[in-house]
Image (cartoon, rainbow, N blue to C red):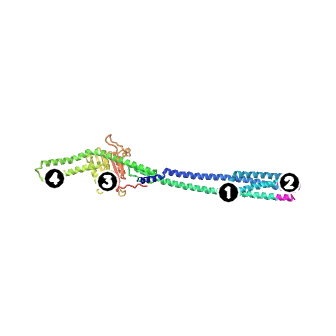
């Protein structure tokens, strides 16, 4: 058994908390953003290197073209200055090519052997020009631009072919670099599109996650808190996610259990306070049947051996009625005072109102005219004792509001299309000032003198009605009276708690 009891705990501990899930989601966003940034930054760096390579190769190409231009001038005019200029540009081209190999070799699309081949060709080209120069210095008399010597002509053709070959090779390498840059730009666009799409999808996933795992639970709990604030202390169904929101729901349920205990205690306390108010009146109501019984018994004792039989029987029947009346009063009082859990059951409203009037009969002054208008067949699913407590509070408040007498009307109606019943307690008392209408249901609010009221009656009544899934409405006018209406679902059903 101990081993099996630990399995659910282990499974629950394996679930990630909302904090961890959100941390993972945002860490993924940060990693993806970092990868996109690193990739883009590397691509931009490589692209900048490529631009430097193209600029450097263009410089190499320009130096080679200048060298060839001076080379052609030399062969046209056999001027050693032109040959010296050609050699100078060849040296510059070689230096620049060496710089490319040294600084940008790993970023160029041209392979290392091709770069080495270009460098060797440039070297060979420069050596060839140097040999022409040496030949020129050694055989100045044999040189004639119009009729050059055979050996000189051969060297001339060789140098020209070599210069053309070097030029074409450099152009090919420059073209490769341009194509490479176009590929980098194209791939960068693809990578950027893929990265943006991935980020969008991840953000969408995170948004959906936050909606289902954070927003919906928060909305669920917010609705639960609103129900609690309205006095509905029914247990909140757990979500079963095993995260912090489940812990919060459990905490709220613990709070609801505690509030239910406190609410029951408060209801019972207010009931006892009402019971204290009713005690003197109930004692008076019990005193009348007891006096009648006592009188009948004294007559029977005095005339036990004589008198008419039918007369004695009448006295006994009347005494039995008085006993039943006293028993009903005591029974109603005991039922009202008994502490009970919240439990709804079908009840006839007319019987409930009449039983309530029996308890309050002695509290209704002679100058207060009572009118009842409750259909015989009007039923509802309610907690009988709690609704009776509400009626007692409302009727007592109305009686206290009519210090100089008046008319007290209790009516009940069934809504045709609303699916609810309404019970109204209307008086012709002094009314409630407008500034107090929004406060009368607040706990401990009272306009009575100290010691005459706790200020909890209407607050407790309001909580009882809301616990039934109903509502309380009040209308009042100074000098003309007040009407309190309680409206309850006919079948007692409350709206289901939405997940």
Local crowd size for mark 1, using a 10 Å CA cut-off: few (<14), some (14–19), many (≥20): some
Residue placed most toward the observer, 41 or 404: 41
In three-dimensional space, the C-alpha distance between marks 4 and 2, rounded to whole angstroms, equals 168 Å
- CA distance for labels 1 and 2: 44 Å
Could one spot residue 370 in this view of the protein? no
Q: Which residues are magenta?
A: 131-156
Is 154 part of what is drawn in magenta? yes
Please tell me the numbered disc located at residue 136: 2
| Label 4 vs label 1, nearer the camera | 1
Check whether the beta carbons of the residues at disc 4 and disc 2 lie within 8 A of each other. no
Q: Are marks 1 and 2 in contact (CB under 8 Å)?
A: no
- In three-dimensional space, the C-alpha distance between marks 4 and 1, rounded to whole angstroms, equals 125 Å
Q: Is residue 471 magenta?
A: no
Rendered location of residue 191, percent (x, y): 61, 56
* Dot 4 or dot 2, earlier in sequence: 2
- Out of 8 and 187, give the one closest to the viewer: 8
């Amino acid at each position: 058994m101990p081993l099996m009891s630990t399995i659910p705990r282990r499974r629950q501990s394996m679930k990630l908390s909302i904090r961890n899930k959100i941390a993972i989601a945002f860490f993924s966003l940060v990693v993806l953003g970092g990868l996109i940034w690193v990739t883009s930054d590397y691509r931009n760096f490589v692209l900048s290197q490529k631009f430097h390579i193209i600029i450097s190769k263009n410089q190499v190409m320009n130096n080679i073209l200048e060298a060839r231009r001076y080379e052609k001038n030399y062969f046209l005019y056999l001027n050693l200055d032109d040959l010296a200029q050609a050699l100078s540009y060849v040296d510059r081209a070689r230096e620049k090519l060496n710089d490319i190999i040294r600084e940008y070799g790993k970023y160029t699309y041209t392979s290392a052997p091709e770069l080495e081949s270009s460098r060797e060709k440039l070297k060979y080209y420069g050596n060839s020009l140097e040999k022409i120069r040496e030949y020129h210095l050694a055989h100045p008399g044999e040189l004639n631009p119009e009729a050059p010597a055979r050996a000189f002509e051969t060297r001339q053709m060789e140098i020209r072919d070599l210069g053309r070959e070097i030029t074409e090779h450099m152009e090919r390498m420059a073209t490769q670099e341009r194509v490479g840059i176009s590929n980098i730009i194209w791939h960068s666009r693809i990578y950027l599109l893929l990265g943006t799409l991935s980020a969008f999808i991840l953000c969408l996933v995170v948004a959906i996650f936050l909606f289902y795992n954070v927003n919906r639970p928060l909305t669920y709990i917010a609705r639960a808190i609103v129900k609690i604030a309205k006095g509905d202390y029914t247990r909140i169904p757990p979500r079963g996610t095993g995260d912090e929101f489940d812990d919060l729901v459990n905490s709220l349920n613990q709070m609801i259990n505690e509030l239910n205990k406190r609410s029951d205690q408060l209801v019972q306390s207010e009931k006892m306070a009402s019971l204290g108010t009713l005690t003197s009146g109930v004692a008076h109501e019990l005193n009348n049947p007891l006096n009648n019984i006592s009188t009948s018994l004294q007559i029977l004792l005095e005339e036990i051996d004589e008198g008419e039989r039918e007369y004695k029987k009448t006295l006994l029947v009347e005494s039995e009625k008085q006993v039943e009346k006293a028993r009903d009063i005591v029974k109603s009082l005991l039922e009202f005072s008994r502490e009970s859990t919240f439990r709804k059951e079908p009840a006839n409203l007319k019987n409930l109102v009449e039983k309530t009037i029996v308890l309050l009969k002695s509290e209704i002054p002679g100058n207060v005219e009572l009118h009842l208008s409750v259909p015989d067949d009007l039923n509802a699913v309610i907690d009988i004792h709690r609704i009776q407590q509400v009626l007692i509070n409302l009727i007592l408040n109305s009686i206290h509001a009519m210090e100089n007498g008046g008319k007290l009307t209790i009516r009940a109606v069934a809504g045709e299309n609303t699916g609810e019943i309404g019970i109204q307690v209307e008086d012709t008392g002094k009314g409630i000032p407008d500034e107090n209408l929004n406060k009368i249901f607040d706990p401990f609010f009272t306009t009575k003198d100290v010691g005459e009221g706790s200020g909890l009656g209407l607050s407790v009544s309001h909580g009882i009605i809301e616990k039934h899934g109903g509502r309380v409405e009040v209308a009042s006018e100074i000098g003309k009276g007040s009407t309190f209406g309680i409206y309850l679902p006919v079948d007692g059903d409350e709206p289901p708690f939405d997940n």
